[in-house]
Amino acid sequence: MIKLIALAIGVVIYLVVKASQQSEKSQKRITPVQKNRTQQSKPVQSSQKSTPEYEKPERTFLKMPSDVDFSGYKLAGVARIDIILAMARLTDEKGGYKENGIMYEAVTEEGVITIPLVVEKDNKKYAVFAFYSEPEAGQFKKFRTVLLEKAGFTECYYVSAYDPEKYEKEDGHLEQGTTFHAIFRKEDNPKEEDFEGRYAMWWSTRKDGHFGSSPVSHYYKKIYESIAGYESIFCGMLIAGLTRSEELSRMNLPVEEKMLYVTGPENKKCIIAISQEKGMRFLLPVEKENETYRENILKLISKSISFLRKGLEERDLPKDEKMDSSPLDWYNYLYNSIDQAQVIADSIGTVTIGNPPAAPSPVSDSIDLSRAVIRVKILESISDEIRVEGK
């Protein structure tokens, strides 16, 4: 009987995830070069294992930097060739740009946008698209708005068989992004030098200096509330997504905190910490002058988990056995400790790997990797501190 119940629960979980994929369309990457937009893409990896080919276009529309010579450039009708030819002109000695990524995944609050080519110059990022149909060309202005306003890009360019400029920004449509368990790619044999740096749930920046009023605290609150009661199901979804397994089942969070070393969008190294006490914590690379990446990715995760929870509740799936203390209790305690004490935190849940350069301001950097002991420092002033510790 117990085996039958376990089997039934596994089937229901599988159906919930499949239903969410169909109704939300959130498993698709936003890929402007994709020929068939109804085809399901695989999690995390680009939706194009082989770039689609087209008939040679009759016309070529270009938007490129004015300081690069693109005279005589004609579309070949094969995306990988057109992008390589564009990259060659941008990155030669005259162009002076540096290739930053091919099929680059940029995370935005709208979802993860796959960009055929990203180049940079003078520490500024530029996106280059290739369009071969009118629907694709019609998305350009929407892509440009999102990338410039929400993802830190300086400008967007294109090579196209159709004129993207004749469409209004409102004509473009961005589908919702990938679900939370498909955003990251697990590193099977992580090396310390690859992950060297500081990671945290939150850290202060000039624009976001207080955790209590930060959008991050709101996103985490939503994440913890949505997972509450279904921790084993979301843990199972996470592990299945990271391992690319099609088998979905409940999986209890570990008693001792475990660190999962992953690569996220934009090829950024991240850590997912999981435990029964603290639940799932998404520790993102600390960038003191940039909060855009963490806000976009946490908003995406919170929306995805909230949506999945609604599916679980609609199917009246049994909740986990109640514990004396839950991850939601831990998060509420953390938040209230900071809010009630009216302290100013420099960072929350910080983990340091290796020996990165010294931080520009006090940041908690104490971690014993062998025991996965994390210490969170909350700084009240230069002389006083409150420390929240957990195993």
Image: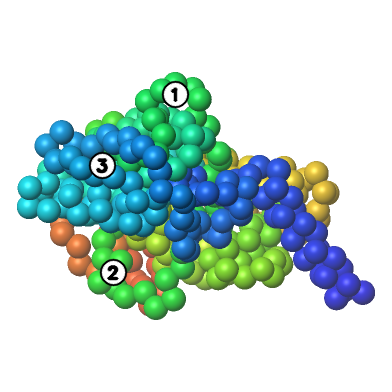
Characterize the local packing of mark 1: few (<14), some (14-19) or many (20 or more) Cα atoms within 10 angstroms: some
For label 3, the residue is 126
- What type is the residue that disc 3 sits on? Tyr
Image-based side of 160 in relation to 290, left or right:
right
Estimate the x, y position of residue 313 in percent, counting from the top left: 77, 45
Q: Earlier in the sequence, mark 3 or mark 1?
A: 3
Q: Residue at x 46, y 55 (%)?
A: 53
Q: Position of residue 338 (x, y in %)?
A: 41, 39
Point out the tag, 3 or 2, that comes first from the N-terminus: 3
Q: Identify whether 182 is placed above or below 220.
A: below
Residue at which label 2 appears = 194
Q: Is residue 151 visible?
A: no
Report which quarter residue 175 is drawn in.
top right
- The answer to the question of whether label 3 and label 2 lie on touching residues, with beta carbons closer than 8 A, is no
Amino acid type, mark 1: Tyr
Kindly indicate the quadrant of the structure image that contains residue 107: top left
> The N terminus lies in which quarter of the figure?
bottom right
144 left or right of 64? right
User: Which label sits on residue 140?
Assistant: none
Q: Earlier in the sequence, mark 1 or mark 2?
A: 1
Q: Amino acid at mark 2?
A: Asp
Of discs 3 and 2, which sits in the foreground? Answer: 3
Q: Nearer the viewer, residue 50 or 377?
A: 50
The secondary element bearing badge 3 is classed as strand
Read off the residue under disc 1. Answer: 167
| Residue at the image position 30 percent from the left and 66 percent from the top | 195
Residue 277 in percent (x, y) is at 56, 59
Seen in the picture, residue 317 relative to 157 is either above or below; the reply is below
